[in-house]
Image (tube, rainbow, N blue to C red):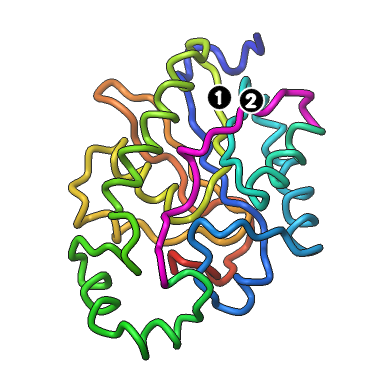
Amino acid sequence: MNGSRRGRGRRIVLWRHGQTAWNLENRFQGSTDIELTSEGVAQAHRAARLLASLKPDAIIASDLRRAAATAAELSAVTGLDITYDAGLRETYAGVWQGLTNDEIIARYGEEYAAWKRGEPIRRGGGELETEVADRAAPVVIEHAEKLPDDGTLVVVSHGGAIRTTIGRMLGLESHHWEGLGGLSNCCWSVLGEGARGWRLLEHNAGTLPEPVLGDDD
């Protein structure tokens, strides 16, 4: 084990997938299985070289193609296998999926406004944010518990799923989760193990400021 890492405590890097065509079109993806653009692949390729310098011990990923392809870039650099888990998928948002932001506001304006106010809303008849945390956070915790004392886990997932997972792991009430800003494509947040549980060490790291394109903007 690298001596510089000793005594640091475990770390979790939550890495959002690269760019997709629907991100560029401001189209709500949810759990729709959309591929990366060529720029998204390039983003993942660049970011993987930075994340490899953290010497991760394990990689887990959503099984949706945009996350799996992003994770594959880090696997290629580190030689680590990827464990895929459907629990890390993005929020299912029913009839909102495939619509642009403007179309959602036009058709479901009251529901959209309630969501933005922080009310527990099943967007498009889909999942509550707390239900996403209920399925995603335990997956992350399970794999984090397998790490060595100063190990690093990389979780490749989606903006909304990552935000709810961070909120749950920090012990925040769900109406405060909106206070965690969205992640730009291929950026990440880092949780570190502290004396009183997990704490947020970095958020939306990995690049100069970029607009947040996606469901969680």
Local crowd size for mark 1, using a 10 Å CA cut-off: few (<14), some (14–19), many (≥20): many
Give yes or no for contact between labels 2 and 1 (Cβ–Cβ under 8 Å): yes
Labelled disc at residue 198? none
Foreground residue, 152 or 19? Answer: 19
Q: Is residue 99 magenta?
A: no
| Residue at image point 63% right, 47% down | 67
Residue under numbered circle 1: 152
Give the amino acid type for the residue marked by disc 1 in the picture: Thr
* CA distance for labels 2 and 1: 5 Å
Residue under numbered circle 2: 56
| Residue at image point 55% right, 70% down | 213
Give the amino acid type for the residue marked by disc 2 in the picture: Pro
Q: Position of residue 161 (x, y in %)?
A: 43, 49
For the C terminus, the image quarter is bottom left
Secondary element under disc 1, as helix, strand or loop, is strand
Q: Position of residue 131 (x, y in %)?
A: 29, 46
Q: Which callout, 2 or 1, points at the residue further toward the start of the chain?
A: 2
Secondary element under disc 2, as helix, strand or loop, is loop
For the N terminus, the image quarter is top right
Q: Is residue 210 left or right of residue 192?
A: right
Local crowd size for mark 2, using a 10 Å CA cut-off: few (<14), some (14–19), many (≥20): some
Q: Position of residue 176 (x, y in %)?
A: 22, 55
Magenta span covers which residues? 77-95
